[in-house]
Amino acid sequence: MQWHVYLSGEIHTDWRQQIIDGCKAAYLPVTFTSAVTNHEASDAAGDFLGPDSGGFWRDHKSSKVNGIRTKNLIEKCDVAVVRFGDKYKQWNAAFDAGYCAALGKPYVTLHDEDIIHPLKEVDASAMAWATTPAQVVDLLKYVIEA
Amino acid sequence: MQWHVYLSGEIHTDWRQQIIDGCKAAYLPVTFTSAVTNHEASDAAGDFLGPDSGGFWRDHKSSKVNGIRTKNLIEKCDVAVVRFGDKYKQWNAAFDAGYCAALGKPYVTLHDEDIIHPLKEVDASAMAWATTPAQVVDLLKYVIEA
Amino acid sequence: MQWHVYLSGEIHTDWRQQIIDGCKAAYLPVTFTSAVTNHEASDAAGDFLGPDSGGFWRDHKSSKVNGIRTKNLIEKCDVAVVRFGDKYKQWNAAFDAGYCAALGKPYVTLHDEDIIHPLKEVDASAMAWATTPAQVVDLLKYVIEA
Amino acid sequence: MQWHVYLSGEIHTDWRQQIIDGCKAAYLPVTFTSAVTNHEASDAAGDFLGPDSGGFWRDHKSSKVNGIRTKNLIEKCDVAVVRFGDKYKQWNAAFDAGYCAALGKPYVTLHDEDIIHPLKEVDASAMAWATTPAQVVDLLKYVIEA
Amino acid sequence: MQWHVYLSGEIHTDWRQQIIDGCKAAYLPVTFTSAVTNHEASDAAGDFLGPDSGGFWRDHKSSKVNGIRTKNLIEKCDVAVVRFGDKYKQWNAAFDAGYCAALGKPYVTLHDEDIIHPLKEVDASAMAWATTPAQVVDLLKYVIEA
Amino acid sequence: MQWHVYLSGEIHTDWRQQIIDGCKAAYLPVTFTSAVTNHEASDAAGDFLGPDSGGFWRDHKSSKVNGIRTKNLIEKCDVAVVRFGDKYKQWNAAFDAGYCAALGKPYVTLHDEDIIHPLKEVDASAMAWATTPAQVVDLLKYVIEA
Amino acid sequence: MQWHVYLSGEIHTDWRQQIIDGCKAAYLPVTFTSAVTNHEASDAAGDFLGPDSGGFWRDHKSSKVNGIRTKNLIEKCDVAVVRFGDKYKQWNAAFDAGYCAALGKPYVTLHDEDIIHPLKEVDASAMAWATTPAQVVDLLKYVIEA
Amino acid sequence: MQWHVYLSGEIHTDWRQQIIDGCKAAYLPVTFTSAVTNHEASDAAGDFLGPDSGGFWRDHKSSKVNGIRTKNLIEKCDVAVVRFGDKYKQWNAAFDAGYCAALGKPYVTLHDEDIIHPLKEVDASAMAWATTPAQVVDLLKYVIEA
């Protein structure tokens, strides 16, 4: 069985690549998906569409275009990894976690110890909490191959 | 028809009370529900249960106890209002929004203009964005009585 | 058992009132709901919210506010009546019919004979086609009381 | 991942072909599906079946046969494109949009600016609004490959 | 808690009345519902609607009108009783049983021993098989009050 | 796209083979499935299991074993064909139709004109009614290839 | 809001009564439901039905009759309490927990510390673990009234 | 069609291997899945994650990691076999059975005659009860190939 893993959240460090590389090195049968992680491209996702607009509506249009992708990929994944970094609001990551929770889709959080408290509701519905990408790789290795 | 409105998010200002008062003044047939909004009580929600524990597991235990309440109230509401203030991470509010989105439960966001960009995914699935509690009251009045 | 009937579609004739009056005269245990049928109010449903905008985004904002109401009422109804008149596009009525069909919610169409052909997909998923409000009253009387 | 795109609506211009050609030129992994677009064949879909009948029942029989196809293809697609042209009632397109909305299936509308107002409810549940087939190709390219 | 019991099937004997009387005598908090059991009225349920037609389409029209009632009542019941007598095809009763089975709605069959074999698939998804209305009353008494 | 067609009902004539042959001759991309159609094998499906038993419980045990197969195949099919012959009770066929109806799974009935009336509820939820296997082949050809 | 609490599991101590009394003393708006807790009555639940039988089939018949009650009550509850004592297999309690988990119905386990290990899968999907009825009362008080 | 069979429960005898070998010998198109059956590995599934902890929380962490695997595999299987041996509590097996029951996923139990009574609720929702692995192989052979 091929496993589908959705990688949600922070886009400023290489945690996605570390997980992908670790799983490849372990020859795990995993396919990774993700939202568009190029920040500028993502913000501009709707710019080529419809009427000129700025501010709220530009964001609105782009987010809905991005939603076509993320909604499909989350609903098709077997497990999601939701990453919270030490900067920015990252409400989209918490939103994805809530979306997974309501669908009954298992997810794992990946974040440092110093944000345990503000993430307690997100962690409460998660199947695991990891602090390093290597732990996520170990978890996937165990879950898939043990 | 009685409408059930779930009030999610920020607990440091009186936005909930303003909405409740506004709807009462308008004689709207609305019942309001909410997570426990007493911060200390909420953090200690699981303290009377099971083995001693600290850190992650204290938060975990309390969040799951709180989840019995929030899960039930969100699933029973007709519309949710999700409030983001200017402080704190408020990931639980974004989590609730994602949960609503996946259930197909309509929700309205309530936040200032300066956080439009980080909330764009949360707003993209919302039915409306308001900046003041009075707007939420007007919206409920229209939706329920117009 | 109280029956909940959602009345969708055309707003320029008094078909809703005829059905309501007919059911009242027959003492049927029916509650009627509907989208906001005041055209100007419905178009302006979102005007009090968020940033200034015109054209597409004004319509967008208002339609989503209206959607909070219609989505709730359709999902709570036991049967919907979807009315198509001889004027205007009335795509919202066909949209409501498709929404009902996907939910497995029974609906009845109400329209003249000269638009049978363009409504064939809408009628194909309907439980009945009526041409007069009186027929709808008779149908409800039979379904509820026979 | 192969993407499944359902093309709904207007059958009198070559918009479907333009989208298909554009995606092929971009080597996108997309499979397109659609209702039967031959108008006469579609109207006659049920003629070989059951009792002789005319008028309403001929349309009814054919539409239900067509429904076996459209229901299956819509439920299996990842995203639908719903096209409204400048002629005819096109209630079936709005019906498909409502069907998608209730299923939580993302869809994009494709129509000119002059019918924004009558399509406001249909657009309110859409993930994007495009005015040209080329925009739809760009959107699919972004959503699938970015 | 009030229990809702749907009584499906045979209309030529007084089994419904026996169950209703038995439950009333036991003061059980039960509400009974049923399809329209007047055979002529049921066959004519759609006669006042739409185009003239005979044979297949008359039956079709009437059955769909009846379906508005039966679909609602079955989906709202807590348990169904499906009765098969010794005459007629009674395919509608078996259809109701299949409908209940797919919904996960518990049902009880009520039939004589000599039709066990042809009813084996219907009984296989039932929660119980009774041979007399009195047994059904006993079952309801136990289930509700024990 | 490969289509999955479930063939339910009568096992005493070669209607299944006619449909299979017709689709093969037309090179349709169809996979056919069915309950076990060997009557004796089906009746004995549970004989090798559990405690000795006769009468009701033998049928019960066998029907539940058969149900593992039929439940899976019905839930995986794209369309079902439900055949009623001129003999026997065939309640299992009507049960399958009800099961399909509740799942929103499209089905086609196949039966002669003289049993239209007793099958009216089954036909009312069907997408089409055919009287010959050749019509079913034509329908599948149209639905899949037109 | 009235809360519905289902009490599942062990029937040899008075834990149910302690919880009910505690909630009554606290004036909580709670309705309690439960399987039939009279052991002999429960074992004999199907004895008045159908053919004579012993061993497996007697248990089978009774358990299905009991299932009409438990299935309805579990699906209608807001939260379940699942109690494991120090004797017997109590597989029905674990079965109820799995049933709740799959439905997304919150449940709390109630058991001593010495059976933590064999209950780890049951606890992993629970929202809380309590060791005394008084803790359950405290939990309900907090969840409902805090 | 490839069948997916989930093997749940007892890990101290070779019943899994017997079923796998039997199906292989019969050339059945079956894929088998299972929870991690190495007891020590399973108990330690979460040891590499998060903060140090012992007792309840070590079990909790490991069980949730295991749940990522079991939840996915159960939801993807076509039929489950749930085995109860003569030792240990095996509440996880009963939990899996309840989970399957709520999902409408067919399952077969495999256990000796002397535990019929405590398993009566688990058996009541099962599609079959077998006492030997060879019977399960026969059942799969029949269900898949007959």
Image: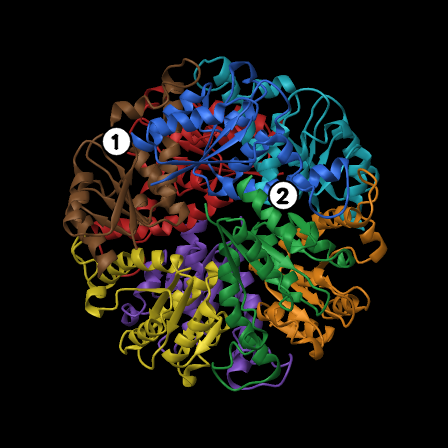
Chain colours: A yellow, B purple, C red, D brown, E cyan, F blue, G orange, H green
Subunit of mark 1? D
Which label belongs to residue H144? none
Q: Nearer the viewer, mark 2 or mark 1?
A: 2
Mark 1, Cα crowd under 10 Å, few <14 / some 14-19 / many 20+, is some
Task: Determine the image quadrant of residue D75.
Answer: top left
Using the rendered image, report if marks 2 and 1 lie on a common chain. no
**Most foreground residue, B73 or D78:** D78
Question: Which corner quadrant holds the N terminus of chain A?
Answer: bottom left
Secondary element under disc 2, as helix, strand or loop, is helix
Q: Which residue is mark 2?
A: F65
**Most foreground residue, H105 or B127:** H105
Residue A97: x, y in percent? Answer: 42, 67
Subunit of mark 2? F
Q: Amino acid at mark 2?
A: Val
Q: Which residue is mark 1?
A: D37
| Residue E122 visible in rendering | yes
Q: Amino acid at mark 1?
A: Thr
